[in-house]
Every structure is written in structure tokens, then in C-alpha cells.
Image (tube, rainbow, N blue to C red):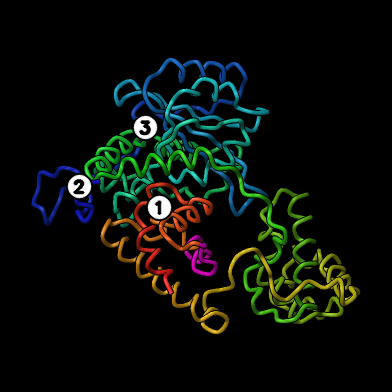
């Protein structure tokens, strides 16, 4: 790239000393006030027309009710388009609408600016909102070498403005939404385009804009992940359950909880926490008294469902040996890295060398190692090296595993050496 990638990111200009920059200025209210949420068809059509008539990139954000509701749907969508003086913000309540296709059509040819886009793209897609071009300010910050890449930290460091983040974990399914929550939501898109412009200039200065372009294009082309074959295996603490019969109890309780959570539109953890599933799977209580003696199950809401949990445990006991889940998940990837030394010492050596290569490049280019190349890609490559193991073979293997061209160009030569016997 011809640039000095070891430089630290350029900071916002300051008028004080280098050691003591001016204090950041709090941003407490949107420039044009807090808008009322759009919740009628006429208001939605008017909002779409205003967005279409504006110019420049459009800042986009969404608020979910993670930890409160089942699934990850959006309960508020925020958009802002236009310059600092002429811009305007639109807040949309998506609940009254089947989709927001009219808004998508209004900004179809516009670059979307999001922060941590991968978090919001799935719920936006459910509403018919799909960017054709985007700029992710969080990912840009990572590539530019910023240590803290949260939206508040980035706006403070780059623009000298602080944002109120007190409602980030709120239950956004609440209706009506409090005015202070709406203000917080509007502020989340207030500075996104300005932040985008500053980060684009910094990426250009560091010679990394082409890297970012590839990353953003990959986000646009990404598809929602396929449902997991055995989602119950992600129960927190499941590693403490050692037997196949115990895993059957985890599965039965998880499935019973999921059915209730889906029906009630509640986050599963609000129905029964993972710790309670694991505790019951380990203890295998045979009656209600034994179940209610376990932590969590004595609570009023959980006690009302005692019959459901006991029924799930009974069904697990009734399974034949052939119906029990396996204690080891096969998967299509390599085993956990801590087992490599015993199972394949040569692969363990390759992995150690490959990690050193990636770590060195991470330091040299001031980019987090996981953004230079996916750790899973490195593990797969080291466990099953390509044949031939020359540069062409390694580059093709990386491409097959989903690496971008800029990543391949950076890590490919070093990984060839790391894979050599």
C-alpha cells in the first residue's frame, strides 16, 4: 500500500496541549429536535419521500429488545440523511407495518452508514431493508487501529462529542416509548455520517481504504447464518454435564423452555436461565419437591412451570441408548486447539507458527488479528493444509474459506512458511 501502517490514528484537532486535549462536548439533544415515531402508512410514505429528496449517505440504526423478547426483531428504526445544517432524522416504529419496503426503495442507491452493521443487518432485512452499499464505522475503526470502537468512544475520540448511552439495554418493545429513549435513539444516528467522513479520511491516509471497501462489500453480500443443527448445545455451562443421559436432560429442558419462550414472546433466559437447566440436568430431580429445592426453581414463575420441567426430565429418562445425544460434537471443523498436541503434533506446530505470523502482521499494520484473518480460517488451514502447499495453493484455500483478497495478500506468504514441514 505504500503507507506507514504503524502510525497511530490521527486524532481530532485540539486547541489545548497535546497532553490535555479539550474536554469532549456532550451532545444531549438532536439538532432538529426529537422526532415523533412514524407509525402510520401516510407518515411512512412522507418520511420515505423526504429521505429520497435528501442527499448524501444515510445513517441507519435499529433498536432491539435483546434479553426481553424472543428473537432479534427491530422495535425501532432510525435514519438520518442530509448535511449538518439541512439533515433530518426519521424514527420509525416498525410494528404497525408488514415491511418497510417503501423506505428501502427511497434509499436504494444510497450508501448506508451503520455502526457494527452485522448486528443490525439481520433485523433490518426482516423489514425489507437491505443496503446495496454500506460503510461500517465500527469496522472502519478496527481497520484504522483504534483501541476502543464503540460508538460513544469513537465519536468522542474522532469528533470530540459524547453521546448518552444510558438506554442501550432498554426494553425497546415498550409502548409508548419514553421521550428520553427516543432522544437517545435519534442521537445514535446524529453523528454517524460525520464519523464516516472522518474515518474514511483516516483510512485513506493509512492506505487502508481498499481493505475497508472489500470488508464492506462482504457485509452487503453476507447472508443470515443457517440455523444451528443442535442449538441446545450452546447452553451456558453445558460443559459441566458429562454424560449422554445428562445431555439428553439439557436438550429436553432447553426445548421445553424454547417452546414456552416462543409462545410468550419472551427471551428464553427470562423463562428459565441456562444455569437452572444445567443444575437440573446434573441433579435429575425425580419429583416436584426435589426440583423446587434447586436454585431458581423455587421462584414463583418457575414453580408454576414445575410440571413442564419434570415432564421434560421424565422424557429424557425414557429415551433408549440409541436416542441419546452424543457427548462429543463432530462438526465439520478441526478439534479444539488444546487437543492438537496429542492428536496431531505437526498440526499443533503449524498452528503455533501461523499464530505468530498473524500476530506479527497485526502489530505491523495496527489491525486486530481477528480482522486480518478469521481465527477459524487459520485453524482449518493448519489442521488440513492445502496440497500443494505453495503460495497458489494457500491463497486458493484461503479464498475457499472466505478470506478477502486484501487479507490473502497480507497473510498468504507468511502462512506458506508456517505450513511448511
Q: Is residue 16 visible?
A: yes
Question: Does residue 291 sit above or below 100 in this rendering?
Answer: below
Picture residue at 43% right of the left edge, 50% below the top:
166
Identify residue for label 2: 10
What whole-number distance in Å separates the C-alpha atoms at marks 3 and 1?
Answer: 43 Å
Q: SS class of the residue under badge 2? A: loop
Residue at left offset 72%, top offset 76%? 327
Residues tagged 3 and 2 counted as in contact (Cβ below 8 A) = no
Instruction: Find disc 1 in the rendering and name its residue.
Output: 408
The residue pinned by badge 3 equals 30
Q: Quadrant of residue 356?
A: bottom left
SS label for mark 1: helix
Q: Quadrant of the C terminus?
A: bottom left
Q: Which span of residues is magenta-colored?
A: 377-387
Residue 200 falls left or right of residue 46: left
Checking the image for residue 392, the label placed there is none
The nearer-to-camera label among 2 and 1 is 1
In this orientation, which residue lies closer to the viewer: 109 or 361? 361
Q: CA distance from mark 3 to mark 2?
A: 27 Å
Residue 268 x, y percent position in the rendering: 69, 58
Amino acid at each position: 500500500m505504500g503507507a506507514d501502517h504503524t502510525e497511530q490514528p490521527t486524532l481530532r484537532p485540539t486547541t489545548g496541549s497535546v497532553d490535555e486535549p479539550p474536554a469532549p462536548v456532550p451532545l444531549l439533544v438532536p439538532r432538529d429536535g426529537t422526532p415523533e415515531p412514524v407509525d402510520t402508512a401516510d407518515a411512512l410514505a412522507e418520511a420515505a419521500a423526504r429521505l429520497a429528496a435528501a442527499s448524501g449517505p444515510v445513517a441507519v440504526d435499529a433498536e432491539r429488545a435483546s434479553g426481553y423478547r424472543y428473537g432479534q426483531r427491530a422495535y425501532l428504526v432510525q435514519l438520518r440523511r442530509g448535511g449538518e445544517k439541512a439533515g433530518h432524522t426519521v424514527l420509525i416504529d416498525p410494528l404497525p407495518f408488514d415491511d418497510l419496503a417503501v423506505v428501502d426503495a427511497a434509499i436504494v442507491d444510497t450508501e448506508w452508514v451503520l455502526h457494527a452493521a452485522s448486528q443490525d443487518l439481520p433485523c433490518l432485512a426482516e423489514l425489507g431493508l437491505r443496503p446495496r452499499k454500506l460503510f461500517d464505522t465500527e469496522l472502519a475503526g478496527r481497520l484504522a487501529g483504534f483501541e476502543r470502537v464503540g460508538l460513544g468512544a469513537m465519536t468522542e475520540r474522532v469528533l470530540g462529542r459524547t453521546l448518552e448511552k444510558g438506554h442501550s439495554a432498554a426494553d425497546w418493545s415498550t409502548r409508548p416509548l419514553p421521550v428520553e429513549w427516543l432522544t437517545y435513539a435519534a442521537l445514535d444516528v446524529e453523528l454517524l455520517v460525520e464519523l464516516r467522513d472522518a474515518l474514511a479520511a483516516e483510512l485513506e491516509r493509512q492506505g487502508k481504504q481498499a481493505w475497508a471497501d472489500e470488508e464492506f462489500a462482504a457485509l452487503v453480500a453476507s447472508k443470515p447464518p443457517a440455523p444451528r443443527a443442535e442449538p441446545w448445545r450452546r447452553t451456558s455451562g453445558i460443559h459441566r454435564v458429562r454424560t449422554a443421559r445428562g445431555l439428553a436432560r439439557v436438550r429436553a429442558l432447553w426445548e421445553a423452555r424454547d417452546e414456552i419462550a416462543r409462545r410468550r414472546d419472551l427471551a428464553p433466559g427470562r423463562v428459565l436461565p441456562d444455569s437452572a437447566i444445567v443444575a437440573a440436568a446434573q441433579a435429575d430431580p425425580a419429583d416436584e419437591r426435589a426440583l423446587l429445592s434447586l436454585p431458581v426453581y423455587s421462584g414463583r414463575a418457575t414453580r408454576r412451570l414445575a410440571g413442564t420441567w419434570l415432564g421434560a426430565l421424565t422424557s429424557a429418562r425414557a429415551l433408549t441408548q440409541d436416542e441419546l445425544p452424543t457427548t462429543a460434537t463432530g462438526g465439520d471443523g478441526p478439534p479444539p486447539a488444546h487437543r492438537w498436541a496429542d492428536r496431531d503434533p505437526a498440526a499443533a506446530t503449524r498452528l503455533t507458527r501461523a499464530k505468530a505470523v498473524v500476530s506479527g502482521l497485526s502489530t505491523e499494520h495496527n489491525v486486530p488479528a481477528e480482522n486480518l484473518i478469521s481465527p477459524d480460517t487459520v485453524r482449518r488451514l493448519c489442521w488440513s493444509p492445502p496440497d500443494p502447499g505453495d503460495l497458489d495453493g494457500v491463497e486458493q484455500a484461503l479464498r475457499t474459506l472466505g478470506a478477502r483478497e486484501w487479507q490473502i495478500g497480507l497473510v498468504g506468504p507468511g502462512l506458506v512458511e508456517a505450513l511448511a514441514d
